[in-house]
Image: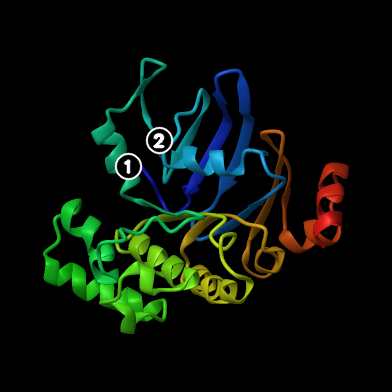
Amino acid sequence: MTTTETPMVVADQVCKNFGALNVLTGVTLEVKRGEVACLIGPSGSGKSTFLRCVNHLEKVNAGRLTVDGELIGYRERDGKLYELSPKEAGRQRRDIGMVFQHFNLFPHRTVLENIIEAPVLVKGQSKAQASERALDLLTQVGLRAKADAYPAQLSGGQQQRVAIARALAMEPKLMLFDEPTSALDPELVGDVLEVMRGLASDGMTMLVVTHEMGFAREVADQLVFMDGGVVVEKGDPREILSNPKHERTQSFLSKLL
């Protein structure tokens, strides 16, 4: 049973390896309902892999992950974990929105068609119902006028805002952002971050892998510095950014700030 007190994400000693390469070596983290947690750290520290484990795009090798009190990717019986079927894992994934570094829009479908596809096919919504919601979401991300455009007719920043609207169309309880602005031209970054700020102020729980320290300082409730597959330091973003305790965090931030 979940309550409003149940954390949205709980990671307990999560490990992930790809063959002999250990990418996550015991990540423990909690994200409360309505909280924004920003994950920062050097390339290869395990941030994106951890995000992909949260919605079971990657299977964990040890430890456990829960979202809204529900064990992700597995069921527990008699103290043992059994992997869910692809269909059951897909059902869990419906409630977790994910926005990638590259927008992954269908090039042969219009903006509106991109957004309504999953609600119609996966949730069984009527096209009319899904389209009405999609237009509301496009208004929210400032792109209602682009409903009939194709992705190739949009800038990178506009495509990323469509990708956010597409994820929101499934009415997720949690949003995952994997470096959503890193593939964008600098002048397009602000529009995407503005949409994310709006989601945060509306109370959406968000896990964000980012290099945008200004966004982390301003919007995040929790800043998580990862290195070598573990959480090295976490806490109040302003405190960590101005006064990091761990020398590895100090070294990383000194190159950025």
Q: Is residue 82 above or below residue 161?
A: above
Amino acid type, residue under disc 2 in the picture:
Ile
Image quadrant assignment for residue 168: bottom left
Q: Secondary structure at mark 1?
A: helix
What sort of colour scheme is used for the picture? rainbow
Amino acid type, residue under disc 1 in the picture:
Gln
Within-10-Å neighbours for mark 1: few <14, some 14–19, many 20+: some
Earlier along the polypeptide chain: callout 2 or callout 1?
A: 2
Do tag 2 and tag 1 residues touch (Cβ < 8 Å)? yes
Residue depicted at x 49% and y 73%? 195
Q: CA distance from mark 2 to mark 1?
A: 7 Å
Tell me residue 97's x, y (percent).
Answer: 39, 54
Within-10-Å neighbours for mark 2: few <14, some 14–19, many 20+: many
Name the mark on residue 9.
none
Tell me residue 118's x, y (percent).
Answer: 24, 56
Image quadrant assignment for residue 152: bottom left
Q: Secondary structure at mark 2?
A: loop
Residue depicted at x 51% and y 55%? 101
* Viewer-nearest residue: 236 or 78: 236
Residue at which label 1 appears: 92
* Viewer-nearest residue: 62 or 189: 189
* Viewer-nearest residue: 69 or 134: 134
Quadrant in which the N terminus is drawn: top left
Residue depicted at x 14% and y 55%? 124
Residue closest to the far bottom? 145
Image quadrant assignment for residue 58: top left
Residue depicted at x 42% and y 46%? 68
Q: How many marks?
A: 2
Tell me residue 55's x, y (percent).
Answer: 42, 42
Is 166 placed left or right of 216 in the picture?
left
Tell me residue 54's x, y (percent).
Answer: 47, 41
Residue at which label 2 appears: 72
